[in-house]
Amino acid sequence: MKKGYFGKYGGSFVSAEIEEELKRLDEAFCRLKKDKVFLNELKTIMRDFQGRPTPLYFCKNLTKKIGGAKIYLKREDLNHTGAHKINHCVGECLLAKHLGKTKIIAETGAGQHGVAIATVCALFGLDCDVYMGTVDIEKQKINVEKMKLLGARVVPVSAGDGTLKDAVDAAFEAYAKEYKTAIYCIGSVVGPHPFPTMVKFFQSVIGKEVKKQVKQKENKLPDYVVACVGGGSNSMGIFSAFLKEKSVNLIGVEALGKGNKLGDNSATIKHGKLAVYQGYKSLVLQDDSGNIADAYSIASGLDYPGVGPEHAYLHDRKRATYVAVSDTEALNAFYTLTKCEGIIPALESSHAVAYGIKLAKTLSSDKVVVVNLSGRGDKDIDFILNNQKTKD
Ligand SMILES: *Cc1c(COP(=O)(O)O)cnc(C)c1O
């Protein structure tokens, strides 16, 4: 397969100047990912700063309530800053340090990726510019304040709708100007090569840990691995260890939002069509004339019109199955897990939990389902409260 491609997906569609820099970045990454000193540093930070390995937790109560397969949660919510995003932020900041860069450029939607990157920049003493849509800045005041406290500069983006996809465009433009001193830290397994490969590498720690942990607890491989898919980083991270294990069913859960109509969901594998978008080729939500559609989901971390190229490829090859879960189903799972296990999941992760429950019900009790709990739900409490109010 051509470097940087997953079948017909992936690649790098950028200016010649940036192409040169991305080549240098890829070379450095390929060298460092085999470098013992680099890998030891990474391991130490992941252990002592982030709190890895995160536990694999058997949901005794939920399993009993559902009455089917055993349900396990991979507790990525217990990472420092509350989600899996810090896995690749730590990796990329360490890479930046080794390359002698002094600055990180990143984008954020709801602010989760922004807070994670600002946190790691504080740790490493790196300058940090986080591009964020003006609409999102208004909606996510606490995360904006957190980023500022951590020493990051939050750069407002008013172009377009002032949301995530506009922030990605603006961050890329800034990177094109500042690449000599800065590195771009994208929020998922998207963007031009080498970003999807790099982010997957740093997120693959999730799958490696799960493989060991399931072996210890169940003395076998899991039968199903379930994870939500926005851009696709937490899912690629947990899938990566099992891609060659044919007996393990991999299930990506997209956001069906309010339904199947264009604009009502973020189910890109289900409804997207081939396009080049933000420097890479993949499935993208678009109308019949090829205009990029607005994505929608109750979970802002899933609300993105593109999807990581490797997911589109795994879908084509039928190595992974992709399903879609609605806002309502995700909300129900949010309440169920909270009440039943005392774990408040992020609304993004609730999509995976919802499907995990649905699936476990249909399986016998000797089967094992691992659900990736990508993040904690503290950030969603305000939204949940307001939503309840409007419902009453
Ligand atoms: C950002 C985010 C996601 C979606 O991103 P992926 O790249 O698809 O993993 C999922 N869960 C949480 C908690 C997030 O913050």
Image (cartoon, grey):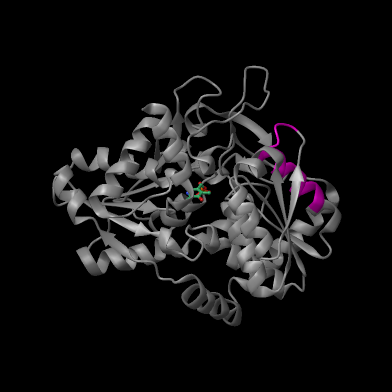
Taking the spot 60% from the left edge, 62% from the top edge, the residue there is 89
Q: Is residue 171 magenta?
A: yes
Residue 325 position, x and y percent, is 38, 33
Taking the spot 76% from the left edge, 37% from the top edge, the residue there is 158
Q: In this view, does 121 lie to the left or right of 23?
A: left
Total numbered badges shown on the rendered structure: 0
Identify the image quadrant of the C terminus: top left
Which span is picked out in magenta? 160-174
Main structural element of the magenta stretch: helix, strand or loop?
helix
Q: Quadrant of residue 219?
A: bottom left
Residue 38 position, x and y percent, is 60, 78
Q: Is residue 355 left or right of residue 308?
A: left
Q: In which quarter of the image is residue 195?
A: bottom right
Taking the spot 68% from the left edge, 35% from the top edge, the residue there is 276
Q: Quadrant of residue 24?
A: bottom right
In the displayed structure, 261 sits above or below 296; it is above
Q: Is residue 78 left or right of residue 291?
A: left
In the displayed structure, 150 sits above or below 42; it is above
Q: Does the magenta stretch include residue 302?
A: no
Residue 48 position, x and y percent, is 48, 78
Taking the spot 68% from the left edge, 60% from the top edge, the residue there is 148
Query: Residue 319 versus residue 18: which sits nearer the camera?
Result: 18
Query: Residue 229 versus residue 328: which sits nearer the camera?
Result: 328
